[in-house]
Image: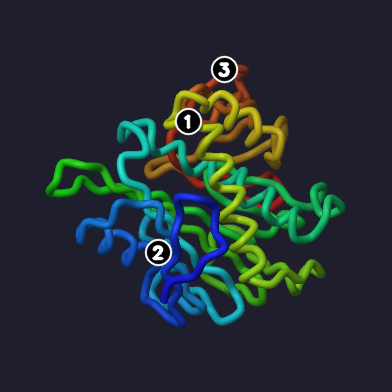
Amino acid sequence: MMAGGLPAGTRREAHESLPSTSLRGLALAHAGDPGGIWVTAGEQTAGRGRRGREWTTGGGNLAASLLLIDPAEPPVAATISFVAGVALHQAAIDCLGPGIADRLKLKWPNDLLLDRRKVAGILVEGEKLQSGKFAVVVGIGVNCASHPESGTTHPAGDFLSLGAPVEAEALFMALAGRMADELMTWDRGSGFSRTRAAWLSRAGGIGEPIRVNLADRALDGRFDSLDAEGRLVLRRTDGGRETVSAGDLFFAATG
């Protein structure tokens, strides 16, 4: 069903249960949807995380995906994950108050942490359509009321068990508004420098020892910064720097 109360230019398709809100978003794109539609589900039974990992969303949690059509050139569109991270971080503060800010951090490349436990993940997927247009789906899963007890690469948590209860619907409405604002700031990628600065101001682990697991090796060093394309800049133990496009980041205490 459709629901209102959203920022101008956006719509919503809300479901009680779906296998995947992002797959539904891509299906809408292939059916000719012009974009700007949020797909939400009270339960998600076959969601996906990075690298094909499972992300199942139980009742009381938030599963939401935003479909965008031609938001930017494909290489630039990947930085929408940072847009979503900033928007989600601010939406949580909107719902819970500024006192939560010190406990709430973004983890490269696409997680939200509360007390250093993963409470949300973001996955950006893109597909070229037969029309020649480029569809991007920004999938966001938030553990509001429960979290996986095992099978995660980083310690998981949820807002409720960590003493910061937030209703999924309230968080979604705040997120939709903040996402619209941050997309305007990002401005099809031309404003990524502002998005990057906002992301870094909310990031966990800057300057700390970290390990980044790549497909074929692990890198140890300190989290230095993000470069102009959103890649992690790692200061290696030998003093050199290395940029990382994709990998799993672990803080020294949790790696």
Amino acid at dot 1: Asp
Q: Secondary structure at mark 2?
A: loop
**Camera-side mark, 2 or 3:** 2
Q: Is residue 176 above or below residue 76?
A: below
Q: Residue furthest left?
A: 130
Q: Is residue 208 above or below residue 30?
A: above
Q: Which residue is pictured at 54% across the width and 41% down the height?
A: 83
Mark 3: secondary structure: loop
State the residue position of label 3: 240
Q: Earlier in the sequence, mark 2 or mark 3?
A: 2
Q: Look at the numbered disc 1 and give the secondary structure of its residue.
A: helix
For label 3, the crowd category at 10 Å Cα-Cα, with few meaning under 14, some 14 to 19 and many 20 or more, is: few
What is the spatial separation of the Cα atoms under label 2 and label 3, in whole angstroms? 35 Å
Which residue does the numbered mark 1 point to in the structure image? 187
Residue 222 visible from this viewpoint = no
Please tell me the numbered disc located at residue 48.
2
| Numbered disc total | 3
